[in-house]
Image (cartoon, rainbow, N blue to C red):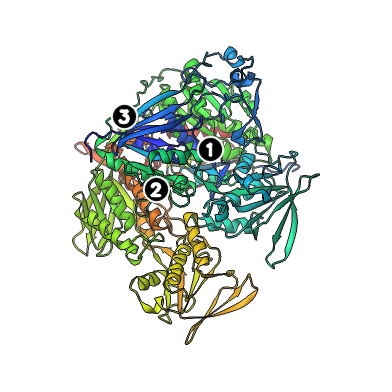
Amino acid sequence: MIDNKIGAVLTLGGGIGGVQASLDLADAGFRVYLVEEKPCIGGVMAQLDKTFPTNDCSACIFSPKLQTLAQNPNIEILAYSKLEGIEGEPGNFRVTVRQKARFVDPAKCTSCGTCAQKCPTKVPNEYNFGHDVRKAIYKDYAQGIPSVFTIDTEHCRVFQGKKCGVCQKVCPAGAVDYKQEDKIVEIEVGAVILTPGYEPFPVARISEYGYGRMPNVVTNLEMERILSASGPFEGEVKRPSDGQHPRKIAWIQCVGSRDPRKGMPHCSSVCCMASIKEAIIAREHDSHIEPTIFFMDIRAYGKDFDKYYERAKSQSGVRFIRSMVSRVVEDPLTRNLDITFLDQDNRLLTETFDLVVLAAGIKPTDSTLDVAKMLKVDLDANHFCETGTFDPVQTSRPGIYVAGAFQAPKDIPQTVMEASAAAGVAVRMLADQRNTLTVKKELPAEKDFTAQDPRIGVFVCRCGINIASTVNVPEVVERVKDLPGVAYAGENLFTCSQDAQTAIKKLIEDYSLNRIIVASCTPRTHLPLFQETAREAGLNKYLVEMANIREHCSWVHMQEKEKATDKAVDLIRMALARSRILESVQDQQLPMVEAALVIGGGVAGMGSALNLADQGFPVHLIEATERLGGNAWRLHRTIKGEEIHAFLKQLIGKVTSHAKIQVHFKAKIEDVQGFIGNFKTTISENGSTPLEVEHGVVVVATGASEWKPDLYGYGTDPRIRTQLEMNEAMAAGNPDVLKAGTTVFIQCVGSRCQERPWCSKVCCNHAVQDAIALKEADPAAQVYVLYRDIRTFGLNEPYYEKARRLGVLFVRYEPEAPPAVDVSQKIVVTVKDLTLAETLTIQADSLVLAAAIVPDEYNKELARMYKISTNEDGYFLEAHMKLRPVDFATDGVFLAGLAHYPKPLDETIAQAEAAGSHAAAVLARGYVEAPGMVSVVDEDLCRGCGRCVDVCPFHAPELKEIAPGVFKSTVNPALCKGCGACGVACPTGAAAVRHFKDDQIGEMIDAAMA
Amino acid sequence: MTEQFDPKIIAFACNWCSYAGADLAGVSRLQYPPSIRLIRLMCSGMLAPSYILKAFEKGADAVLVTG
């Protein structure tokens, strides 16, 4: 490795993957250059309406991240730019970037929009797929970052040699510059992370579906825009041809996916769930809509996906039809669309729909392929970035990493995990360059308002139409603007957007505001953002208050608009009452024990431990058994043919020989004390004397196990094996399985049922892999796979095709009529073949059961000890299912591997890397930022009775003898959680939580009842 | 009584559980009457009995304590 490494990283692509990687890198102490081809960052996620399986509003969960990114002084956004060259080696690259001319000076543009208002040239808006228009000077979307307009030279009259120049004349900032030229920027970085995302397959090429000729045939991304409040129809579900409300909507799956003849042999992974979500949301917008989804297999393989699918069927009125649609025929008069399909009884039916949505396949963009060529990064057979199972984020070129849909089609959480993993691997390589190129954010001094009367600014958010379609926002502003203490009141389209933050800061200045109230959504997600904005304007962050007029008002009183408006005013009045008497509070920095504890010595735990240790942090790795490796010992090869044991031995070697890692075998956790930065975990090894380990962070990687089936004769006959047992038998060369004349695989054994309503995710791929191996070893072997849906998602789909070509027979069964197994001389399996509508009897020599993956019972105990949660299935529950897949809601605790949810090896490895690097970033900071919102005791009022000591569950208050016989309570801010139980128990009112004092709550009660 | 009884309810919610639950009700678009006013606390442990008395004193028809 070279010695002139550079503490900076370039991320290519500003979608959720690039944003996450950039944030992680900056958080870990590295300078970041984020290069994006489009004028604004945000990528596909910014275009989505909602996200599955939680139906979170995509913009609402993504905006805070974009915001944090834009405010980070260590991230430079190079939008409207492309990579032109690269030289050097890992640790020290020199990259050439071309910044295209926008013809608007970003330093001057205030994004006021006057130019676009006055521009005479209308252009179809590609951001909304041409369903509305924009001007020739434009911004992709209102909240776009960077907040700068751009001239589209293809359409601008000036660049077409016509007379115009209106934008230059009207721009109040003088930002328009028709002579601007492209800029070439040379950047030095230690590593490059590729997160260029994807583009939909050009579905117009599949002419039988009529896309491009029939206006009411749209793609699923267009449907996202149609459903979106900020979309072309402002969230009203309309069809393009006539603006009418469609009643019958059809989704057609796998359009340009699973189709080798179209050059798209892979499964696009996300479309099944995306279509189900769009169907549910469309009905939510308009209950008259009747959604139908035409599909081959529903691939609901992720966490909580199957439950979502089942709910769509049973509660949301979504009709599912398992049939490939051969063509769509348009009625030229009505523009309605006829779809012909086979129903479950194999009858050919034709049905008319008002709107058809095509689930377009996912492919890397052409420009990504060009960049990959320039970077000399290899592609795989499907034209995605070539990676190995054991290094899922490493491209073929050292120092260049990949994450997201360029690696393989995948959903948001998997992209986020990989982005964090790629950042983690880059940080590992560059660890000694941490903080060498970063700058600290300069904040203005906090102003002292103690003697001033309140001057409160009230910012009422429309949230697109999320609030404004129910609550009359202008009326709310009018009704609160003259209330006592209010110095300013106004409304915003999206108060969380970048331009709104700039506006808020300016208004704080202009109106000398000393407190602000944001009436928008929940403080649980958005308070930190507004606190940061206020802080940048010199306000203490505790002088920010929120009124939740979305989750608690507009969304829950949709039918009572007047009362909802009254309630919004009331909620703001309550916030005002509190705001008037709020005080500044100072946060504190507490010491950090710079060591980690990793629980679980499988692939996940070892991966996390190595990431932490390579970054220089001591790690205690605890393993319940006497051997590292976990479930991976029972696997032999990956579907690509890589040797798992060889990898495992190498990994174990690295872990056991690492100077920073101490492995505790046969270890058990006896007790846990403390919190982020200062955990004390007591462990015993093989029943030895308990040992107390001090650590600042924890990674939970306790794994999961294969269920022991009580179905299909398991346990009664040695020829019946689970998948893992089959794997072991095949690895051992056992002739009973390798030379079995007839082998039957039964899928979903104990998965996707009432007791275990989840898909175990890996079993379809394992069955396909084993079936191929059996057929390749002996082409005369009979191999059957009995399945419900084949879920060979992503780049595994070509293996499914290969298995069928080799003659493996796939027979689908319904859960209501599962296969029957009768063990005699042969294993007799009977199943109703739904395609032939006949009962099939198979005389098998070997039966393989895809037994469910089940969470560990121990998870519940661990959850209690570290104050983390499990979901109803018993898997650990991450902080946010979409955007925080490796963090727990409890600070300082992280999650990786099967303990989170069943997943294949490459995903486990990526998640482990991500969890390790998030944990390391916390340690690298060197201190814990403790909120000032903790309990304090007024010594004059305290009479030393000790009731606070008795009630505190966190052992924070302590009685100290300040004079002989005189006791006073003091609270340790490091232990205090700010729950306020001490204040309630205190008979004299001496103990109180800062920011939640009695009067600060009492005033709200008064205001609520006024 | 000619008018329908529309009770005024004050609810106290813990930031970490029931407030999040009320958020989820919003995200799930569960509809409920608008006459409830919710006050966020950092923990239901900080709810002094006096707050409940105060709410009744000021005219609340009901007080909901969640956490």
- Left/right of residue A296 with respect to residue A62 in the rendered view: right
Please identify the quadrant where the C terminus of chain A is shown.
top right
In the rendered image, residue A903, in percent from the top left (x then y), is placed at 42, 57
Residue picked out by circle 1: A46
Q: Quadrant of residue A917?
A: top left
Can residue A461 be seen? yes
Q: Quadrant of residue A600?
A: bottom left
Residue picked out by circle 3: A438
- Left/right of residue A606 with respect to residue A386 in the rendered view: left
Disc 1 is placed on an element classified as: helix
In the rendered image, residue A721, in percent from the top left (x then y), is placed at 42, 75
In the rendered image, residue A205, in percent from the top left (x then y), is placed at 62, 46
Q: Residue at x 28, y 43 (%)?
A: A428
Q: Are marks 3 and 1 on the same chain?
A: yes
* Earlier sequence position, callout 1 versus callout 2: 1
Query: What is the three-letter code of the residue carrying label 2?
Result: Phe
- Could you tell me how far apart the alpha carbons at marks 3 and 1 are, in whole angstroms? 28 Å
Disc 2 is placed on an element classified as: loop
